[in-house]
Every structure is written in C-alpha cells, then in structure tokens.
C-alpha cells in the first residue's frame, strides 16, 4: 500500500444533495459524499483487497480516515426504514470495533480484523427530527456507501451473522402493516464453568405490548453452540415499533454472535404449516419421525428449517425426506452441521411424502436437547 501526497480535511458542509449510493473510489462520488454526509479527515491511499470467491486482489485508491470521523444523515431522505451498508478496508495493524446505530443500539458491536475488507450493516428509521450517525475510527478506508429503503419492491433486511454482544444491546425497527418473519441465527461461546437451562437471550417486543422471549434450551459449561430464533409478527395498525433486545446481561462469560433477517411474508404465510419437535440426545443416534403424509397423491413442499440447541458434542444432525424425485429411501435434504443451523432464504424442497430428523449426541454422556422448526406447504396431486 502507498499513500498519495494530498491530504484533505472536511467539516461536514452539507451543501450537496444526499445520494443513495456512493462509490468512494471515484472522485465525483467522493466529493459528493464529503459535501453531504461526511464529517472528518481523510487522505487518499492505494489499498489492495481480495475479490470474494477468487484468489485475485483488487487495487483501488480510497479515502483512508486520518482521525475518528462520522457519517451523519439529518435530512433530505424520504421517511421510512433504511438499511445502510458501508464497505470498508481496515488498514490498521490491529482490529477495530464499530458500534452501529440500529435506531438506539447501546452495546452491539462489529469487530473488523486487521488488513481486511468488511461490510458494516446498519438500520435507520427516518422520520421528522431523526438523525442517523455512526462513528468510524481512524485507519478505515471507505470504499462504498449505500442507503436502501427496505420493504420496497420485495427487498428485506438481511444482516449476516457478524453482530457481537456480551449480554446487552437493542435493535429497533418501525414496521408498517403486514406479516413478518424475523430470523436471528446465532452462535454462542460459554467460557464459564456454569451451565444453563432455558437460557433467555432476550426478547422481541412491540410498541403495543406484545413480547416474545428468545430462549436457548440449554447451554453447557465451557461449551459452544448455534441455532436460529424464528419469530412471526403480524402488524395490524398502520405501523408498530419492534424492538429486538439482548437482555441476559454481562458478567456471565457468555458471548453471542448473531445476524438478523426481517422479511415481509404476507403471501408466504397463508399456505404455510408449522411443526416443532424436540429431541434429547445422550451419546447415541436418534431417528425421529417428523411428518408422514397420508393420502394418495398428496405431497409436501418444505420451505424452511432451523435447529436450536446444537452444541459441540452433537456429531450428526440431518433433515431427511422420502419420495424426493420418487425415491423410496430417505435422502438428506439439509445437514445442519455442515450447512449451518438454518436453511438458505430461498430454500424449497418439493415432492416430499415423509420427513425425519436423524441426530447423534456423540460420545458425551451429557444430555443435549435440540429443537427443530419446520415450515411446509401441503400440495395435492400426483408427483411429477
């Protein structure tokens, strides 16, 4: 990496119209950015970062912050709920920590490793008087900034599993009338010698008083695990403020890393059925029947599956189905250990007549309870 000669200093003149996308490696976009929503100091520097999925590096000239700086949006954008993405490169020799806005966050953080590319995700509800701001540390090179109004034309909130908490933090969303799926995939690490049953991570609550606890069935001493919280909310008024709160508190020696996906699902929910099944494992393989369709010509479409309660002692956890493409034997359609704890958002498995979960607690004698959540649609007609 090499520094260019010219250093520029900006003090948020805010005299340019806000754009919804800035490619900050291009001079025109950079000038518009620093004259509208940026406050701080930077210098231009050449950086090299890897192109995702390849072994190729890309060299760009980007503004590297030379002091702690911030992005501020105080006006000019249409009212609504926005997803913010800030693509950065950490030029520092050590990791840096970012605290996103998230409409009132007080403890959730991102950690960006040294000499690495990262996308900061944030949430902002714009209404009269609301101001968005995020602090950015010295040494970050800014590559792209975008602002997307969510729940327009089918888009959604999708924050990868990169948010860190040690027991506190909030995310607030203003959701308009409709039905929503809120998915929170997580991993945890318990460094203490204490174990917990029905551990309450936090809650999903609304401004009209609804509250849903987010509970991990068991956390073993000195263990790690993963799962997905799945909550469905129906907003019947014009809008409600929905708050996702992490409330288990610091000092327990338990850290979580989690993500967030919020999707409007009005059409999806009408034809969807739900089933949950818990299995207790203690050192041997268990096969649990989940669904068995009765009636000639009737079959299922699997839409979503997630498992909570997995620990490091679980050596096998697979969802299997029969009559997939007229097969008479069970076929694994999702491996929760290899593929993660929940299915991809676009997952859909058709032509299923029976479903089972097969899991193994390994050699551990400690009981582990895992819980499967399965969403499916019943279809009629002959299998094609």
Image (cartoon, rainbow, N blue to C red):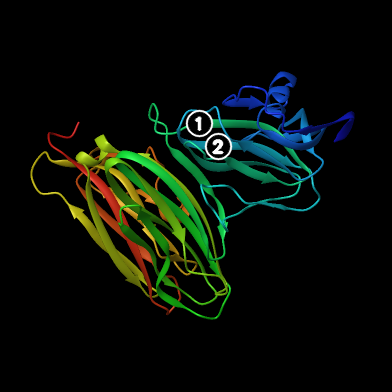
Name the side, left or right, on which 36 lies relative to 138: left
Q: Which mark is residue 84?
A: 2
Q: Residue 217's x, y, as percent?
A: 37, 69
Name the side, left or right, on which 146 lies relative to 290: right
Residue 54 appears anywhere in the view: yes
Residue 348 appears anywhere in the view: no
Residue situated in front as seen by the camera: 85 or 35? 35
The residue at 43%/52% (across/down) is 184
The residue at 29%/65% (across/down) is 278
Q: Residue 249's x, y, as percent?
A: 52, 70
The residue at 38%/37% (across/down) is 346
Q: Residue 281's x, y, as percent?
A: 36, 72
The C terminus: image quadrant: top left
Q: Residues within 10 Å of mark 1 (few under 14, many from 20)?
A: some
Badge 1 vs badge 2, beta-carbon distance below 8 Å: yes
* Cα distance in 3D space between marks 1 and 2: 7 Å
Secondary structure beneath label 1 = strand
Residue labelled with disc 1? 148
């Amino acid at each position: 990496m090499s520094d260019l000669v010219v250093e520029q200093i900006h003090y948020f003149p805010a005299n340019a119209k806000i754009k919804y996308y800035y490619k900050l490696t291009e001079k025109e976009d950079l000038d518009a950015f620093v004259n509208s929503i940026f406050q701080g100091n930077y210098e231009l520097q050449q950086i090299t970062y890897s192109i995702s999925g390849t072994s190729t590096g890309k060299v760009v000239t980007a503004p590297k912050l030379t002091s702690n700086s911030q992005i501020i949006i105080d006006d000019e954008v249409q009212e609504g709920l926005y997803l913010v993405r800030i693509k950065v490169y950490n030029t520092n020799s050590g990791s840096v920590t970012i605290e996103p806005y998230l409409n009132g966050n007080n403890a959730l953080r991102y950690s960006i490793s040294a000499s690495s590319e990262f996308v900061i995700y944030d949430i902002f509800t714009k209404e009269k008087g609301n101001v968005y701001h995020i602090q950015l540390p010295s040494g970050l090179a800014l590559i792209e900034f975008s602002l997307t109004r969510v729940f327009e034309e089918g888009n959604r909130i999708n924050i990868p599993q990169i948010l860190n908490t040690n027991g506190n933090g909030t995310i607030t969303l203003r959701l308009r009338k409709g039905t929503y799926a809120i998915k929170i995939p997580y991993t945890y690490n318990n460094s203490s010698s204490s174990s917990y049953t029905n551990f309450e991570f936090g809650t999903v609550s609304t401004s009209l008083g609804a509250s849903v606890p987010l509970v991990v069935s068991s956390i073993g001493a000195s263990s790690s695990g993963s799962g997905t919280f799945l909550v469905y909310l129906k907003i019947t008024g014009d809008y409600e403020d929905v708050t996702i709160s992490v409330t288990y508190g610091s000092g327990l020696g338990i850290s979580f890393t989690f993500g967030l996906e919020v999707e409007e699902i009005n059409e999806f929910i009408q034809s969807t059925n739900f089933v949950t099944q818990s299995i207790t494992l203690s050192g041997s393989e268990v096969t649990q029947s989940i669904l068995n369709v009765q009636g000639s010509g009737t079959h299922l479409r699997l839409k979503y599956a997630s498992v909570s309660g997995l620990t490091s002692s679980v050596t096998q956890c697979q969802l299997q189905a029969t009559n997939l493409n007229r097969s008479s034997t069970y076929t694994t359609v999702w491996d929760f250990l290899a593929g993660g704890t929940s299915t991809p958002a676009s997952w859909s498995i058709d032509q299923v007549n029976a479903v089972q979960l097969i899991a193994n607690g390994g050699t551990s004698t400690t009981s582990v309870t895992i819980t499967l959540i399965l969403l499916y649609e019943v279809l009629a007609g002959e299998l094609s």
